[in-house]
Amino acid sequence: MGSRALLGSICAVFLALSPLLVKAQQKTYCNPINIDYGYTPIPNFATHGKHRATADPVIVTFKNKYFLFSTNQWGYWWSDDMYDWKFIPRKFLRERNKVYDELCAPAAFVMKDELYLIGSTHGPAFSLWKSKDPTTDNWEIAVDSLKVGAWDPGFLYEEDTDKLYLYWGSSNVFPILGTEINTKTLQSEGYVKPLISLVPEDHGWERFGEYNDNTFLQPFMEGAWMTKHNGKYYLQYGGPGTEFSGYGDGVYVSDQPLDGFAYQEHNPFSYKPGGFARGAGHGATYQDTYGNWWHVSTMIINQKNSFERRIGIWPAGFDEEDVMYCNTAYGDYPTYLPQENADHVKGLFTGWMVLNYNKPVQTSSTLGGYQPNYAVDEDMKTYWSAKTGNKGEWFQTDLGEVSNIHAIQVNYADQDAEFLGKSEGVYHQYKIYSSNDGKKWSLLVDKSKNQTDVPHDYIELKQPAKARFLKMENIKMPTGKFALSGFRVFGKGTGEKPKPVEDFIVLRSDPKKFGERRNSWLRWKQNDLADGYVIYFGKSPDKLYGSIMVYGKNEYYFSGMDRTDAYYFQIEAFNNNGISERTPIVKSE
């Protein structure tokens, strides 16, 4: 072979491998996940502004691929790696189904060599679908009408017994129900069992309201999901309301599929009431291709409508004592994608911190009260908007010092959007420049040719960059104004991380005296170097699986405790340079 032919062969091999090499460089993701969320299709949900919305997610692993279904998307997604999600347009409702909700709170499960899917319904008119290859729009009807009519359904297929079970319910009055489904007829044979109900008088986190204390309504129990592990059945449920930051998932455990469920001591197992993107309720638990457990759930915005929501994915699992947990600490910071032999108890947080929290910003223009600093306040509910969506509108952030930048998350807000329902062929285009002095700029990220819809774009840099200033220039918006709920820069500063928190105390009513024991008041000395704090809690000093992120304050009013039990707490401080050591554990009787 001549040298030219050999060179050609080497180039051909390199070109064939290069997409894989590029893909391999992407090792992380950031919540809320970056998928092309559809806009609400329901007109009366958009009276305060048209906006993107989805919730009630389900991920199932089928033939070594991940399939994601969620509310009202007129299709679904699949992925090889849990990062790059491909959308498949598809409407599953039939002409006889006269509803807006196209697969509201869907259920999906794998039975033998097929994936099955159905949406929520109160009647018998919905069809159950199945597919051997859902990477394409290749579905057929498995059963014309699922007669049991389940809202917020969840299925469990047991391969070893060849049995199928259905769990469902969404109500602030009625319990979660369960029934066995005949695997041949795909119908319930009539035996329906009430299984679990909320007990808000004992479980503080099950109370309605943003802080579990606005009890103007009875709380809602919804989003049933079942996982079997080590011979035990873990019946999961969402509560107390999808509108609230404290929206979480709890779990009851039994050694039987339709009886004998007991409240897991460590609840809620999925919970994220603080941080940039909040909420971790109404979800589904699944295994990745390495066998590690994950939990996907609903995150809330609740700005233009109570049902304005997004999707988050969290490392989860079962500990050595089979306690189910979900790790949401730093859950909206860069997180490693699935990997072999991962320790989900410790978590997959990269350690890359937010570099521009509440730092100075400049903009090309500002629309009314949508002020610039709302894009750096670590709150997805607030946002900055330019006066237009025109090319040339820009947003600039000052990190305060030259820092090591590893990743950037661009979270768009829906200001004056014009779409209802799923709109294909829409996309964002922009450029991000970096500078050390705010005068001389270099191109850092070029999305000027982008043809995809990236409402929560996440860019993991191939090599860390050093800069003090970042400037994002709009080129094209899919609709509406150029608006950002979070321009988040991740990496490490060059200064000191905070020292451990001092004087951490937990104030709670004595168990022998009258008082509200579902609540506690946590206080500590303000740490001069801290941007914020993460509080860890649990009912055993070795199982502090719960976490709460607090920015800029030295107190937290925690209303999510179970009335009768002792709790254990720790706290750590963080800033753009890193995380302090945790305090000693504090016990609260």
Image: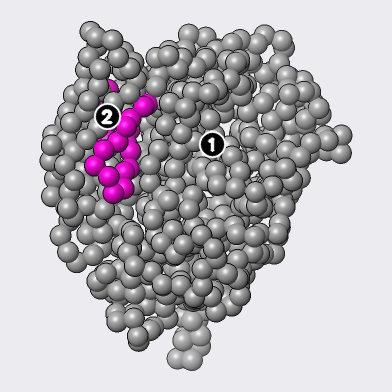
The reply to whether residue 185 is in sight is: no
Three-letter residue code for mark 2:
Trp
Q: Secondary structure at mark 1?
A: loop
Q: Examine the structure image and report whether residue 101 is included in the region drawn in magenta.
A: no
Q: In the rendering, which numbered label is found on residue 243? A: 1
Residue at the extreme front of the image, as rendered? 368
Residues shaded magenta: 536-560
Q: Is residue 39 above or below residue 295?
A: below
Q: Position of residue 366 (x, y in %)?
A: 51, 68
Asked where in the image residue 243 lies, by quadrant, the reply is top right
Three-letter residue code for mark 1:
Glu
Please tell me whether mark 1 or mark 2 is closer to you in this view. 2
Q: Secondary structure at mark 2?
A: strand
Q: Is residue 242 left or right of residue 277?
A: right
In percent of the image, x 46 and y 86: which residue is there?
7
Q: Residues within 10 Å of mark 1 (few under 14, many from 20)?
A: many
Q: Nearer the viewer, residue 3 or 148?
A: 148
Q: Position of residue 81 (x, y in %)?
A: 49, 53
Q: Nearer the viewer, residue 132 or 207?
A: 207
Which residue is under mark 2?
Answer: 521
Q: In the rendering, which numbered label is found on residue 87? A: none
Q: Is residue 506 left or right of residue 409?
A: left
Q: Examine the structure image and report whether residue 549 is included in the region drawn in magenta.
A: yes
